[in-house]
Image (cartoon, coloured by chain):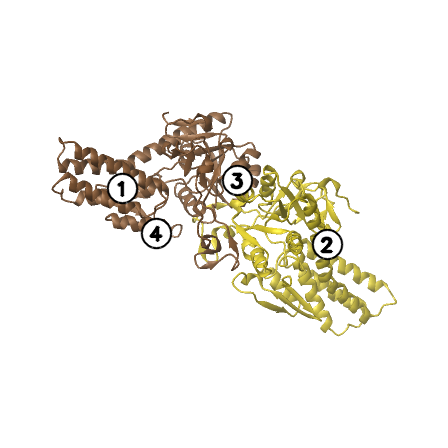
Chain colours: A brown, B yellow
Amino acid sequence: MATLQAIKYNDGQLEILDQLLLPESCTFVPIWNVEDAWAAIREMKVRGAPAIAIVGCLSLAVELRKLAAPETKEELCRLVQEKLDYLVTSRPTAVNMHLAAEACVKLCTQLTDNTSVNVAEAKDDIVKHLEAMLANDIADNRAIGEHGASDIMKKNATKDKLRMMTHCNTGSLATAGYGTALGVIRSLHTASKLDQVYCTETRPYNQGSRLTAFELVYEKIPATLICDSMAAAAMKQFKIDAVIVGADRVAANGDTANKIGTYQLAVLAKSHDILFYVAAPFSSIDFQIPNGHSIPIEERPHSEMTHTGSIRTAAAGINCWNPGFDVTPAELITGGIITEKGVFKPDQLAPHQ
Amino acid sequence: MATLQAIKYNDGQLEILDQLLLPESCTFVPIWNVEDAWAAIREMKVRGAPAIAIVGCLSLAVELRKLAAPETKEELCRLVQEKLDYLVTSRPTAVNMHLAAEACVKLCTQLTDNTSVNVAEAKDDIVKHLEAMLANDIADNRAIGEHGASDIMKKNATKDKLRMMTHCNTGSLATAGYGTALGVIRSLHTASKLDQVYCTETRPYNQGSRLTAFELVYEKIPATLICDSMAAAAMKQFKIDAVIVGADRVAANGDTANKIGTYQLAVLAKSHDILFYVAAPFSSIDFQIPNGHSIPIEERPHSEMTHTGSIRTAAAGINCWNPGFDVTPAELITGGIITEKGVFKPDQLAPHQ
């Protein structure tokens, strides 16, 4: 069984798995242009910071491939920049789309300045750059998977098969494919070293039960769903070997912002003498931020907690607290931070590894 | 605002709040006989071990009041026992209904043996005994509330107002009224010592968001709903002063079985230097059981985790683990075990306090 592919791209044809229909239905929708991508991102048909950037950029590649080359490189670059500016507005907090847009604009400037490149060649170069993002992200994720799996196997050398726990969705549905934390679990499974992965529901938006569980069932990876409240009981009863999560942003000292609930899994892992790992692309490490205190935490709508679809699940009038993320202090990341460049202890992070 | 009354009984008239309709609607349904009570318990219109026993016994009182006294006390007692045996089958795991039935049968035997009591008087005595359960349970709960609040205030004497955290539902909707852990929070509020109570959703059955939140809104107690995954982040951010939960069963050494998620709250409380209390009637302490290892843990249907009403919230085919309870080791109950007889350290429990 191949890895679930939620973003399919071939020769200027882009299709994405509509995550809004999961887990009821597994339906792919075509993306013909940047407007389609913008709407799909805004409506959360696609989510996860890397996936958002890749779908946005690929939708631009789709358009550019169909476009007759403009008269001048300046005109081409103006057009590309306009479309990127528009894509960035789809979900302003997703930093990856910003970064991807910046990188593409930088390339436009270089191409414009390079007098040996004509407008048609410039257009081709931009398309190639955008199309490469998909393969690059998957390659990075596979490297994360390999580094992570080998580190975890090394630290559990006496064990035949391992029991892992993960939180939220960090798989094919959040990245270009394969995944970060879930990529490590995929690699363990491929190496026949995975006994079972316990995935949390990840309330209130249920990324664990809807998305991670979907990927695990799809790929026949041995998995058990637990409620977020069952993590400690599961750690104790099933003798979990390691907990692995993704990251939205890692500070220079290793403090890690990730989906709400991550911090408490790290505390519980420590109490149960279980290794705790973070898996993320190296680009998620923000060396501008000294520690987790400076990471802003988004508060999300109360309706996520009070309703499931149209069904009210909480008493009317109750006040809610719904932070989207929390910060796990570096000292609780006892396993390490797994990147495509290797596994680092939080205090070993440096900009140029 | 009076305390929410979920079980209303007056002169042979019994009505209960239909908890299945919460939080959408606050509707009382009449209970005319033991069959009505059996169905209401089985369908979970009423839940919580003390509440089940009280509704069962009061439904028998309703029937007995309307009944012409049988010819003999033996006949009366046979009838009472049959109806009690039937009530016990409504939810076989609820030990309180068993205990209540045993106590009532014992009274029947005493009355039969007592030659100075005629059959009409015996019937009245049984009715009085059954009717007294409601008031007795509320009185016990109020005592738990007072003991608990005064202990918590004493241990936080320098603080003007306290921030509490609780789990599941231990209030008027689980008991005859007032509640155990939630009763302590009510008492703190009445004493103007409550700043805020944070209540967990309590997945998968949402007793926190549906029931506890309903009670707190109803009585205008300052409260905030959190997801189970947010407990540690809330403890840290809001500087919680104490966590208080109920108990399904307490072993002789103080190990406590309670709603799944309790154990992890206790671990998190310890990590954050927060006092952790259990509040329960003294009758919940089972001195026959030396420690928590002997307490059986019920596994509940997976559909509780995979669906909300008719909405699927988890991927089809995913395996689930859905234990109803977990066991919190005595050493994590740092605040103490609050009963109607006072507050005890786990190692101070003894059958005759």
- On residue A57, the disc is 1
Mark 4, other Cα within 10 Å: few <14 / some 14–19 / many ≥20: some
- On residue A264, the disc is 3
In the figure, is residue A290 to the left or right of B149?
left
Q: Residue furthest bottom?
A: B68
Callout 1: SS:
helix
Say yes or no: labels 2 and 3 on the same chain: no
Q: Nearer the viewer, mark 4 or mark 2?
A: 2
For marks 3 and 1, the one nearer the N-term is 1
For marks 4 and 1, the one nearer the N-term is 4
Mark 3, other Cα within 10 Å: few <14 / some 14–19 / many ≥20: many
Q: CA distance from mark 2 to mark 3?
A: 34 Å
Question: Does residue B154 lie above or below B126 as drawn?
Answer: above
The residue wearing badge 2 is B143
Mark 2, other Cα within 10 Å: few <14 / some 14–19 / many ≥20: many
Please state which of residues B327 and A323 is positioned toward the viewer in this rendering. A323
Measuring from the top left, give residue A49's x and y in whole percent.
36, 41
Protein chain holding label 2: B
Which amino acid type corresponds to the residue marked 3 in the rendered image?
Gln
The residue wearing badge 4 is A43
Residues at circles 1 and 2 in contact by the CB criterion of under 8 Å: no
